[in-house]
Image (cartoon, rainbow, N blue to C red):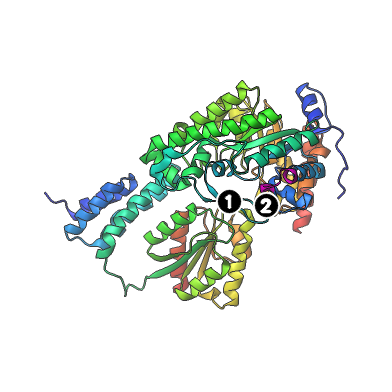
């Protein structure tokens, strides 16, 4: 299977043309490669913890290799909690994980201080990487800085289970930690915006798989809203991602005025489109595990087309993406296939061509099974 | 006036279900002081409250915070009853489970809930924790003469460890002696079949029920 060598437009040209209602080479697409860029560039993932240049060059290598439409500085969920005192484990060649929360004794929750993005933890490395990225590819592709949402960060400050218990037992403590997290995340995001990036928010602990919509509305949504409002005040739209099932909070999120919402593969694009497609752009949601990591290229092609079929006519726009960050060892041929599928389909989407491609792919899958 | 056994059993179940940890422990004290049967208080009162909480979780009435608080109330009251429970030795239903999150993964909320659910189904549970090396599963299965091994992962990158553990059970001649179940976000029935596990369930409550059925079937 040959891969078309190059797209006709840069992601920035493409996005601008689509915004003007013009025809373009293909729809934008983001396989969401994350730390897998280390496999393209040929470095250990732990080098991202110390070398801004490596982090940036690996991101550029991933972008050049696959041609996707979004570059993002995002290594793991914990840099902000770490900058506020949490301990993390840093495997040599795998993603950083939380070791111990910032606050050892829950009674000490008031001792937590907002972070300084220019000084604390790995944040200066991230900010420097952003400068390299802007210099390197800033004129051709949108670059974003990831942050977690305030509630998720609060969970890492005090420990996930403690925070979940405190939602009932000590609501004031949860609000306090969310407030300090909000200030911290704004400080970091402001530094990123000053460099020229736009923010994205990942808020995994707000998933309806973890907390109820009621707890979400009391403890998470008010701070997310303030975060989104702050970005709007700086003329930055923001794409939000929440893992797991989210259908019961879609309207809350859309009403915050996010520019886009990226959904997990357990949620339905079709339903999401019906509910909030007239308020915000929808992104998603090829299964990063079963399909992208473990599936065959034909399965990736089918899943990508399926997402597009469900979402392409969403009023505020749609972008095919993976349902969450890809596993580091996702085969390159599957990532290529996702991109090649949107290249072949073109833009605007011709529904007949889409159906034809789906039928061909179905036949291919039948053959694979036989 | 002292409350009847039935009243206290119902109240303990409710206290667990309503996340009232202090209330549950106080009721358990009252129950023990009245001289009622501790095992019955556990199985008919506390465990039923916990089971009901599990059902509410399946029905999306309860979520992780509620389950954590129910399990806090459950364990607090169990601690009160435990010293008064006569050990069953001849029921023929004593079952031993070894559970853990496979190596490379530290997501353990689901596994912790499974532990509670298995205990309510009558298992003695050896919890190996999270990020557990394959060899530890093998050693624990042998040492505790386990009837059941439950392993979970939330990450696609560590799923492969499950197949490795099953292979090692075979290599050590233990596979036929234990029922093996797998669970976690990316796991499916199809994956369980593919790697030769005996079962998969999408949530902890049904997994514990299935574990009991499979172990009893395996014995007969």
Query: Relative to residue A58, is residue A239 drawn left or right?
Result: left
The x, y position of residue B137, in whole percent, is 53, 68
Residue A161 in sight in this render? yes
Residue at x 41% of width, y 57% of height = B117
- Label 1: which residue? A97
Say which of A292 and A139 sits in front. Answer: A139
Q: Chain of mark 2?
A: A
Main SS type for the magenta part? helix
Decide: marks 1, 2 in contact (CB < 8 A)? no
Say which of B46 and B194 sits in front. Answer: B46
Say which of B174 and A307 sits in front. Answer: B174
Tell me the quarter of the picture where residue A76 sits: top right
First along the sequence among labels 1 and 2: 2
Query: Relative to residue B176, is residue A128 drawn left or right?
Result: right
On residue A46, which mark appears?
A: 2
The x, y position of residue B136, in whole percent, is 53, 69
Per the rendered image, the range of residues in magenta is: A48-55
The x, y position of residue B142, in whole percent, is 49, 75
Q: Chain of mark 1?
A: A
């Amino acid at each position: 299977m040959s891969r078309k060598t190059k797209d006709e437009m840069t992601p920035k040209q493409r996005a601008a043309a689509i915004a003007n209602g013009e025809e373009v080479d293909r729809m934008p697409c983001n396989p969401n490669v994350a730390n897998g860029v280390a496999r393209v560039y040929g470095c250990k993932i732990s080098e991202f913890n110390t070398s801004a240049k490596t982090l940036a060059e690996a991101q550029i290598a991933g972008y050049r290799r696959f041609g996707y439409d979004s570059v993002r500085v995002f290594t793991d969920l914990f840099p902000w909690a770490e900058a506020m005192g949490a301990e993390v484990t840093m495997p040599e060649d795998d993603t950083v994980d939380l070791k111990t929360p910032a606050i050892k004794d829950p009674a000490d929750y008031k001792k937590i201080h907002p972070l300084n993005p220019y000084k604390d933890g790995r944040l200066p490395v991230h900010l420097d990487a952003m400068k390299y990225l802007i210099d390197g590819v800033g004129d051709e592709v949108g670059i974003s800085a990831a942050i977690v949402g305030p509630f998720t960060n609060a969970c890492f400050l005090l420990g996930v289970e403690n925070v979940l218990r405190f939602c009932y037992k000590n609501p004031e403590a949860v609000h306090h930690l969310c407030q300090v997290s909000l200030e911290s995340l704004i400080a970091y995001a402001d530094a990123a915006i000053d460099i020229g990036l736009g923010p994205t928010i990942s808020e995994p602990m707000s998933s309806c798989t973890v907390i109820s919509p009621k707890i979400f509305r009391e403890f998470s949504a008010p701070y997310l809203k303030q975060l989104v409002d702050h970005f709007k005040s700086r003329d930055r739209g923001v794409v939000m991602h929440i893992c797991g099932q989210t259908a019961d909070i879609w309207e809350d999120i859309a009403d915050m005025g996010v520019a886009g919402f990226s959904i997990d593969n357990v949620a339905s694009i079709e339903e999401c489109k019906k509910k909030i497609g007239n308020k915000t752009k929808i992104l998603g949601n090829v299964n990063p595990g079963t399909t992208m990591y473990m599936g065959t290229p034909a399965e990736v092609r089918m899943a990508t087309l399926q997402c597009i079929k469900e979402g392409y006519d969403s009023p505020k726009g749609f972008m095919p993406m993976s349902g969450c960050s890809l596993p580091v060892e996702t085969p390159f041929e599957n990532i290529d296939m996702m991109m090649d599928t949107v290249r072949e389909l073109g833009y605007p989407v011709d529904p007949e061509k889409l159906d034809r491609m789906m039928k061909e792919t179905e036949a291919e899958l039948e053959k694979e099974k036989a | 006036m002292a409350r009847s056994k039935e009243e206290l059993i119902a109240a303990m179940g409710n206290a667990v279900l309503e996340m009232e940890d202090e209330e549950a422990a106080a009721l358990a004290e009252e129950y023990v002081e009245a001289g009622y049967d501790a095992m019955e208080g556990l199985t008919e009162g506390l465990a039923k409250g916990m089971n009901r909480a599990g059902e509410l979780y399946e029905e999306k009435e309860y979520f992780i915070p509620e389950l954590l608080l129910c399990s806090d109330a459950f364990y607090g009251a169990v601690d009160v009853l435990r010293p008064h429970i006569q050990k069953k030795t001849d029921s023929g239903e004593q079952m031993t489970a070894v559970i853990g999150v496979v190596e490379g993964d530290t997501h353990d909320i689901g596994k912790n809930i499974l532990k509670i659910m298995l205990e309510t189904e009558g298992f003695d549970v050896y919890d190996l924790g999270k990020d557990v090396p394959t060899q530890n599963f093998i050693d624990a299965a042998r040492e505790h003469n386990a009837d059941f091994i439950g392993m979970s992962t939330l990450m696609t990158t560590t799923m492969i460890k499950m197949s490795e553990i099953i292979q090692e059970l075979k290599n050590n001649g233990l596979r036929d002696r234990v029922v093996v179940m797998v669970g976690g976000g990316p796991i499916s029935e199809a994956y369980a079949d593919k790697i030769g596990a005996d079962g998969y369930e999408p949530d902890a409550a049904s997994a514990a029920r299935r574990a009991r059925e499979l172990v009893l079937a395996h014995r007969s």
